[in-house]
Image (cartoon, rainbow, N blue to C red):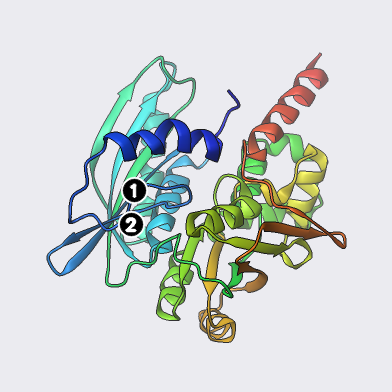
Amino acid sequence: MRIGKLPNDVLDRLILEPIKKWGIHRSEVLTSPSVGEDCAAVKLGDDICILSTDPITGAAEGIGRLAVNINANDIASAGGEVIGLMVTTLLPADITEAEIAAITEELYKSANEAGIMILGGHTEVTDAVSRPVISCTAVGRCGRFVSSGGAKVGDKLIMTKYAAIEGTHIIYADNRSFWEDKLTEAEKAECESLSDMLSVAAEGKAAAQAGASAMHDVTEGGILGACHEVSECAGLGVTVYEDKIPLLDASRRICSVCGINPLRLISSGSMLICAPDEDKMLSALEKEGIRAAVIGEITDGERLVCRNGKTEILAPPTSDELYAAAAKIKRETDLSAK
């Protein structure tokens, strides 16, 4: 099978349908596993506990910081605050103690900066991996749970920041020497700044307070994949306008060289918000200094994307473009080394 998340139809058939068939339901659990729903919500007395889990598998550099931000983003997308992380770290046999210490320091430093406690976890060296893999379970709480599937017909689709943030960061950071003569100094500076854009905690809080009907962290499959997942999760249609999606110059250049679509590239750091009142939402985000753009709307029709003056069916997410970029860079690097 292709590398990356399972395609939504395969995920539904092999994972979600068996859960519906064989799984039990408890009254404390407020959500059911579904495509596009990143968090579970559990009612505990007067509080709602939110849980989410995600691994970091597509990056080599900065995985400690990515692990913290990506998992915290899922909780923020549900309108919650992260309390702590359980961390599982799988390490290759050739790793050194110094490298383990560096990953640990980055993980703890990033968690401390975000006010997140490391609750525990598991660390082991195994021949099952060829490079470090971190998988976290985030534990959070909220007053009002915002579901990824809560969109309503007529809601505006609002995205924060830019498309392809995380993917651009990873492709550049993992291959700096490859990009040395291919990017301008301004584009390199843009790439270096992206690690500071990976959190969506601020927009999650602001959007929840401003009445978001649904929120979704833009991860694998990029912004177009996220738009499809939000509408699928709600059982509704969507219309997306590609020319309204903001993109950094560095992302355009890197994706052009790699021959990939930036709108299908992993983009943690951007949040997709469904808002019944676009003016109220944009005002709330602007007040927090968060760039945002209206890129579409939820409908009761088909899932569509408008590009170059034409309207087409919006395809569901497949293997993220990150893997195609990594393969292209490896091929070119191997050729230049001969």
Look at 41% across and 74% down and name the residue there.
Answer: 208
Residue drawn at x 41%, y 72% is 205
Q: Residue at x 19, y 61 (%)?
A: 43
Q: Between marks 1 and 2, how big is the CA–CA gap?
A: 6 Å
At label 1, the amino acid type is Tyr
The residue beneath circle 2 is: 112
| Side of 209 where 171 appears, left or right | right
Total marks drawn?
2
User: Is the residue marked by circle 1 packed among few (<14), some (14-19), or many (20+) residues within 10 Å?
Assistant: some
| Front one among 133 and 304 | 304
Q: Which residue is mark 1?
A: 108
Which residue type does callout 2 highlight? Answer: Asn
Q: Categorize mark 2 by other alpha carbons within 10 Å: few (<14), some (14-19), many (20+).
A: few
Q: Determine the residue located farthest toward the left in the rendered image.
A: 45
Quadrant containing the N terminus is top right
Q: Residue at x 44, y 68 (%)?
A: 204
